[in-house]
Amino acid sequence: MTEQPVPDHLDVVDVSTQGLSRLLRDEDPELARWIEELVATLKSPRETTLAGWNSFLDPGAGSN
Amino acid sequence: MEQLSRPWSRLQLTRSEFGRLAAGRGDTAALHRLRCAQRNRTVLVLKNLADRNASLAASAFLLGHAHDAAPTAVDVLLGHPWLAVWAVDRVRRDTVGRPDYLPFAALAAAALAGWSDAPVPVPPRAGLVPVPGLGVLRRSGGGQTVTPADLTGRRWTPIRRWWFTHQSLTLDLGVDDVDPYRDCFGLPVAARLTPQRAAGLKRSVGRAWRLLVARAPGHAAELAAGMSLFVPLAGGSTSRHSVTHADGFGAFAADPDLTPVDLAVTMVHEFQHSKLNAVLGLVRLCEPTDPGRYFAPWRPDPRPIDGLLHGTYAFTAVAEVWAALRAHPGLAAQATARFAVVRAQLDWALRELARAPSLTSAGRLWTDLLAERVGRLAAVSLPVAADAAARREVAEAERACRRTIAAG
């Protein structure tokens, strides 16, 4: 039986079974698009605001 | 000719893994998935960096060849917290104001692959050469390369790695007090611990581990499956005694002089942040546009929704540990007092989460599962005076925070 998906799942490409050297040589445009999206997300203002520590620190950041 | 794409699979949490993580029962499979997700992200970022920078590409390919030769060991390296922190920082800012970490990771990979005599290029100005997960080498000259065979002798300082086993459950913990890139937490880190101080810390971690395995075995099992690295903080610089980095899965920094019981609670607390950070890389729990600020009972300042989610998740686990420690003859009074306060804090936190409009369906599901855990804690019987004092303390904190929010 297939499990129900988690709602609001982000789309993350899975390269975990690829060898790193093969991945580095891979020129698949779809993979390039996935990586561009990931990098854009990591550079987004929200991600950079929340970057770094999150515990007992900077009241301005995404701490607990 | 345009190259055709091939199908790519997605890295996803199953619903049952998500549920077990929210419920504090993250088993080995769920934690393996989180580690895998963190490594997956690091590898994708490394490819982006290698595609844009020839120097980094050379190091990345060396790392890749070592991965072919020793996949299991190099997989661990690719999941190293400082490599992830550096890679994400590097892709965001293009420069990180210090030598790139990737050549050092390539050196570690060569060592792990057993290429003793392979000359690995390292930044020429690096007098101190960190070798992720292994140690640091102090260099006297300005050579362009280091071989794994150089990682020995009096110039080599290895990272301490300790194994603690109690009731067949093992915590495998590295203590990093040498790698200069361990300073990512934004707090002063301790210098290399003396043998005497390290022995004291080892005793404390051992006692903490026995406490957790005996009293909070579910949380201990999670730590065994996912916590990997401890960074001692410098003493006297701050009253805040522990911290986690959002990109450094499995690592935490803390005061090395914590008591065993505080260390036990701290390890559980900080690992919740690691888990939730990894979950947030896979599932959207809240809308990113929520401008709201919420009362987070463990903080004097109003928090954004992410902070409230983090705190509620972490302190739910903390409350569970304190509740379990109440049965320990030597800790009952301390555990009862701490549990009363944290339980009262969680009541408020859940009320705040309930009014947050920005939680997604997944966020509501996550919060509902946390509420079930807090509901079980509500059934724990406490002395009336302790419970009342805790609730008064938290209510006063809430009023103070509301005044701060009202004042803008």
Image (cartoon, helix red, strand yellow):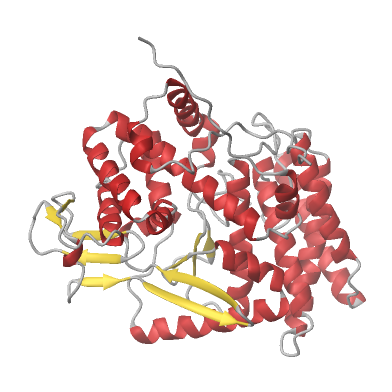
Instruction: Relative to A19, say whether B118 is above or below.
Output: below
Q: Is residue B358 left or right of residue B183?
A: right
For the question of whether residue B215 can be seen, the reply is yes
Between residue B280 and residue B332, name the one nearer to us.
B280
Between residue B326 and residue B355, name the one nearer to us.
B326
Instruction: Relative to B111, say whether B122 is above or below.
Output: above
Instruction: Relative to B168, say whether B304 is above or below.
Output: above
Q: Is residue B45 left or right of residue B264?
A: left
Across and down, in percent, residue B313 comes to: 70, 54
Q: Residue furthest top?
A: B1
Residue at the image point whose x is 63% and y is 46% from the top = B279
**Looking at the figure, which quarter contains the N terminus of chain A?**
top right
Q: Residue furthest front?
A: A1
Residue at the image point whose x is 76% and y is 41% from the top = A3
Residue at the image point whose x is 30% and y is 66% from the top = B135
Across and down, in percent, residue B398 comes to: 78, 53
Across and down, in percent, residue B237 comes to: 44, 66
Between residue A14 and residue B245, name the one nearer to us.
A14
For the question of whether residue B93 can be seen, the reply is no
Q: Is residue B189 left or right of residue B61?
A: right
Residue at the image point whose x is 54% and y is 82% from the top = B206
Across and down, in percent, residue B229 comes to: 46, 65
Q: Is residue A49 left or right of residue B295?
A: left
Question: Quadrant of the rendered structure where residue B88 is?
Answer: top left
Q: Residue furthest bottom?
A: B329
- Number of labels in the image equals 0
